[in-house]
Every structure is written in structure tokens, then in C-alpha cells.
Amino acid sequence: TRVLDVSAAGLVLLVGVSGAGKSTFAARRFRPTQVVSSDHCRALVSDDENDQSATDDAFHLLHTIVDRRLRRGLLTVVDATNLHPHPRQELRRIARDHDLPCVAIVLDTPPDLIRERTRNRADRVLDDDVTTRQLRDLRRTLRRLDREGFRAVHVLRGPEEADTAVVRPVP
Ligand code: CTP
Ligand code: MG
């Protein structure tokens, strides 16, 4: 069983393609208020969590929530794909502004399982080429994540590791 240490006062970024299981992972291990989801923020500003034209507003809101929670020293989990360096850097900067650490938890779920889940999902319709692009972005992300300045990078390879991993908040 993997034990993932995360700072009890700090930021956690989930990283993974759509269908990797980020929201499922977060719901099983964190309180609902600890999880800030880009899809939920999209829904809050547009009434449609799939409305990609609302992305800028959604991330503005997400950053504001993260900032205000970290100001209180509250453990905060960002449920977004986090597949691009610049948005990750922005989130680490918010944590650093509060002198708090930032940890990454990567759900590296096998592509075949991703595609199977994506086909069977009722809550989201995804183009196959979007998945392909995200899978490529994930490989690139995994090559550089260790050098980005996270306190820790935890990579969960496959559904068994993701399902059994235990998150341990540490002081
Ligand atoms: N799923 C599953 N078993 C898991 C994790 C997820 O069967 N251990 C299924 C979920 O029921 C869901 C799909 O896989 O239908 C995607 O999981 P989800 O947690 O929603 O993935 P996310 O990474 O949050 O995807 P998105 O970025 O699109 O929100
Ligand atoms: Mg999700």
C-alpha cells in the first residue's frame, strides 16, 4: 500500500487526463470542501461544467478559492487535469505566497482503461483526439514534474495503486 504524505496545511495538485479517476480519488480521500474542482468552477460561472468557453472565468474563481483557503492554512486539493506547466506554476506560486508547500499526485492510468472509461461515461463526452493529446501531455508532464519545485511528486501507476493509496496529512 502506498502512503502519500501531504502537508496538512498546503496545496495538493491532482494530475491526470480526463477519465484518470481524479474526482473519484479526491471524493474518497478528502472532505468535499477541501476539493476545488475546475469542472465545478466552470459550472458555477456558466451553469455547464463542460462549457470550455468558461475556462478563464472558472480558473479565476478556482485561484481565488485556493488563495483564500491557503490564507487560512487549510489543506486544499485542486481537481483539474493540471497537464500544463504554466497553470501548475500559477498554483505553486499561490502556495508559495502563503509559505505553504505544494504536492503533486499523478494518476497515471493506462491508456486502454482511460479509453474504455471514457466511452462508458454518462457525465461527459470526449473526443478521442482530446484523450490522445492529453495522454501525450501527461508523458511530457511526467518527464519534468520532478524539476518543477513540488515538495513531493507521488505517481500512482494503474488503478490498483490509485484505489489502495492512503493519503497521510503530515504537519
Ligand atoms: N472510475 C472507475 N474506477 C475508478 C475511478 C474511476 O470506474 N477507480 C470511473 C468513474 O466512475 C468515472 C470514470 O471512471 O465514470 C472517470 O472517473 P473520474 O474520477 O470522473 O475521472 P476524472 O479524472 O475526474 O475525469 P475528468 O478530468 O473528466 O473530470
Ligand atoms: Mg473529474
Image (cartoon, grey):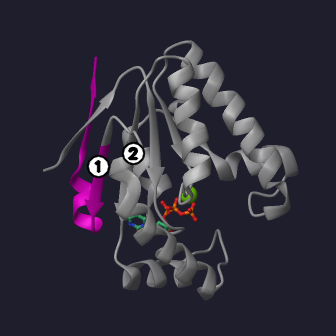
Question: Of marks 2 and 1, which one's residue comes earlier in the chain?
Answer: 2
| Residue 135 shows up from this direction | yes
Secondary structure beneath label 1: strand
Q: For residue 29, what is the image quadrant? A: top left
**Tag 2 residue:** 104
Residue at the location (44% across, 68% down)? 140
| Other-residue count near label 1 (Cα within 10 Å), few / some / many at <14 / 14–19 / ≥20 | some
Q: For residue 55, what is the image quadrant? A: bottom right
Magenta stretch holds residue 100: no
| Residue 11 position in % (x across, y down) | 46, 31
Relative placement, left or right, of 103 versus 52 is left
The C terminus - image quarter: top left
| Other-residue count near label 2 (Cα within 10 Å), few / some / many at <14 / 14–19 / ≥20 | many
Q: Give me the C-alpha separation between circle 2 and circle 1.
A: 6 Å
Secondary structure beneath label 2: strand
Q: Which residues are magenta?
A: 153-171
Q: Which label belongs to residue 12?
A: none
**Tag 1 residue:** 154
As displayed, is residue 164 above or below residue 151? below
| Residue 137 position in % (x across, y down) | 51, 70
Q: Amino acid at mark 1?
A: His
Asked whether the beta carbons under mark 2 and mark 1 sit within 8 Å of each other, the answer is yes
* Foreground pick, 97 / 55: 97
| Residue 110 position in % (x across, y down) | 34, 77
Q: Amino acid at mark 2?
A: Ala
Residue at the location (44% across, 77% down)? 114
Q: For residue 167, what is the image quadrant? A: top left
As displayed, is residue 50 above or below residue 37? below
